[in-house]
Image: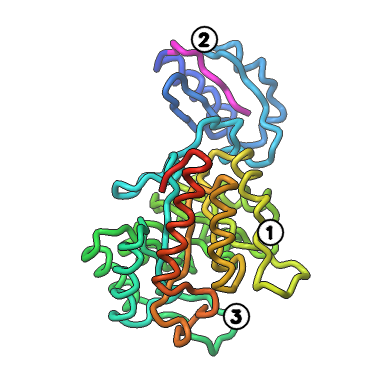
Amino acid sequence: MVIVMKLNATSEEIASVVENIESLGFKAHLSRGEERTVIGVIGDERPVEPEHFEAFAGVERAVRILHPFKLTSRDFHPEDSVVKINGVSIGAQSVIVMAGPCSVETREQLMMTAAAVKDAGAHILRGGAFKPRTSPYSFQGLGLKGLELLREAREQLKMPVITEVMSSQDVTLVAQYADILQIGARNMQNFALLHAVGEIQKPVMLKRGMMSTIEELLMAAEYILSHGNARVMLCERGIRTFETATRNTFDINAIPVLKTLTHLPVIADPSHGTGKWELVAPIARAAVAAGADGLIVEVHCDPAHALSDGAQSLKPEKFTRMVEQVRRVAEAVGRTI
């Protein structure tokens, strides 16, 4: 249920409503907009009628949320959320580009790639220190050494860093090095991990599971927001279908659907969405046209010798060309990069 307070509602009136919500055994979640405050009633509020809260002073109306996801819903938070990270705003009018290697392999490889993507216009550096792989014999990442290299690149190039965290036990460690914690597709429903990143209060990018519905993605985000961590981004990275021509099937429909259902920023991953470098730029252009707030793209200076995902990694010069194309698409739909 959502309780919309009147424009002139006082702090005392808001506090009285919150106190009553909690006395009934629910959690209250406040969202303060530019004009008014909205209070979310978290829990199974079905036994309580909206009229109960409408009797309180300062309440304009109370409305049930029909979706199972509450905090992620536009019913609760009608305005777009903007996640701010070291001067970068994700979810505003500008399209944000995150780029870098799939895996941190060596200092030279990371620094060369990081410098190249920044020169091309990337705002945030991506790189994997811990890598969940299908095969236990594949490269699993450098771990702590990879995190240290990412921090060095961040300090040298003044770029925020996003990297994946794979277990709840590693959240505190990774949060010391990364500006954004990435939850990979395989961990979208790792509920212990979702609780942990919610509690750490760092920005989170949650990737859609390869066989997950949009509602399941939003319910996973709900776990994070339920801890008061509102700095959450959603990522469409392709889903598994019967099609074998590409690594995954990039669900372009998901972008406008998510923008309709939720206030959270939506990021597109054309690298994992296709699995083929020659398809990355076309899908990136389509994603921006469809309303994506950002892109996350894999770039490698020598894809043929990459330790992971070389087939879907762009060389720096191709990434530069992609950014130029995406910029023109963004301008055509009234946005910027």
Q: Nearer the viewer, residue 127 or 42?
A: 127
Magenta part of the protein: which range?
1-9
Instruction: Find residue 47 and report its image quarter.
Output: top right
Task: Say which label, 1 or 3, has the lower sequence index.
Answer: 3
Quadrant holding the N terminus: top right
Say which of marks 3 and 2 sits in front.
3
Residue identifier under label 3:
134
Q: Can the viewer see residue 230?
A: no
Residue 58: x %, y % from top left: 50, 11
CB under 8 Å between discs 1 and 2: no
CB under 8 Å between discs 3 and 2: no
Q: Amino acid at mark 1?
A: Ser
Q: Nearer the viewer, residue 303 or 211?
A: 303
* SS category of the residue bearing label 2: loop
Q: Amino acid at mark 3?
A: Thr
Residue 100: x %, y % from top left: 40, 68
Residue identifier under label 2:
57
Residue identifier under label 1:
212
Whether residue 196 is situated above or below residue 100 in the rendered picture: above
Task: Say which label, 1 or 2, has the lower sequence index.
Answer: 2
Q: Residue at x 39, y 71 (%)?
A: 316
Q: Amino acid at mark 2?
A: Ala
Residue 181: x %, y % from top left: 42, 59
Q: Nearer the viewer, residue 211 or 27?
A: 211
